[in-house]
Image (cartoon, rainbow, N blue to C red):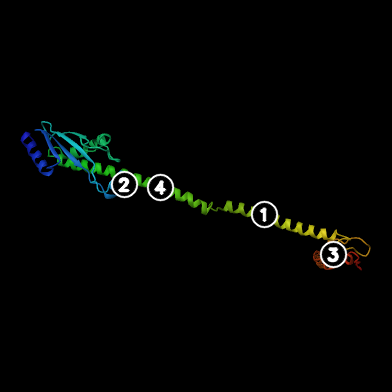
Amino acid sequence: MGLEDQQEEIEVLESIFPDELTKTEDNEFRIAIKLDLPDDVIEATKPDDWDPEDEYEAPVMILSVKYPEDYPDKEPNLDLSPPPQQHEQHPLFSVADDKDELLAGLTETIEENLGMAMVFTIVSALKDAAEQLIITRHEAIVKEKEDAAREAEREENKKFHGSAVTPESFVKWQTAFLQEMADVRQREEEQAAAELAKKVRGGGGPGGVVGKDGTRLTGRQLWEQGLAGKVDEDADDDDDDSVPTGDVQKLKIDS
C-alpha cells in the first residue's frame, strides 16, 4: 500500500471518528478512544463527592499511529497516552501503567491483518481490552468484598452454632456429663445422710431418739423400727414450737 492508499484509509477513519481523529502529519494521526463501561462499574467508581448533576466522563486513551513506508505489509508504529485535558485518573485504569499490557495484546490482531488496512481493527481491539481490564478489576473488588462479608457472617454464626459435634467430642461430653451427674447424686446422698445423722445425734435434744437402754438409736435402727418418719414429724413440730420437747426426749423404745 503506497502513500495514496494510506491517505485513503485515513479518510475512511475520519468518517468513522469525525470528532476523535486528529491528523498531525500525512502519515501520522491520533484517535481518542472513549471507553464504554457497565452501569454498575460506573456507579462503583464515581468519587465520593460526586454531584449527580455533573456529567460522567468516561475514561479516554489516545492512540497515536504512524505509518511506516511499507504499511500495511509492515505493522504501524503505535503508542498510547492519556488525554492532555484529563484531570483525574480513573480508579481502575491508568494509561501510563496499562499501556504496555494493552499494546502487547495487539500482537495477534496485527499479525492476522498484515497486508490489509488494520487501524480500525486495532482501535476496536484496544477498546475491548481496556474495557475488559476495568471490568475484571471491578469484579475482583466485588468478590473480595463479598468474601469478606461471608467470612464475617461465618464468624458471627459461630457464636450461635458452637463447635461442630463429632463422635469424639460427643463421647468426651457424655463422659463429663455422666461424671457430673454422679457427683451431684453423691452430694445429695451425703447431704441427706448428714441431715439424718444430725437428727439422730440429737439424743436428749430435739429430734434425738434413745432406745430402751438409754442409747441413741442409729439411722439404720430408726428405719428398721419404722421410726424415721416419727423423727421427721417431731423435728418439724419442734420447729413450730407446738410439741413439748421434753416428751420426745423421754421416749423409750420397746424392742
What is the number of the mark on residue 44?
A: 2
Of the residues shown, which amino acid type is indicated by label 3? Leu
Spatial CA span between label 4 and label 2: 17 Å
Circles 1 and 2: CB atoms closer than 8 Å: no
Q: Residue 190, relative to residue 91: is it above or below?
A: below
Label 1 neighbour load within 10 Å: few <14, some 14-19, many 20+: few
Q: Amino acid at mark 1?
A: Glu
- Name the residue tied to disc 4: 147
Q: Residue 215's x, y, as percent?
A: 91, 60
Residue 27 x/y as whole percent: 10, 33
| Image depth: mark 1 or mark 3 in front | 3
* Residue contact at pointers 4 and 1, CB within 8 angstroms: no
Q: Is residue 16 visible?
A: yes
Q: Which residue is mark 3?
A: 222
Q: CA distance from mark 1 to mark 3?
A: 32 Å
Amino acid type at mark 2? Ala
- Residue 99, labelled with which disc? none
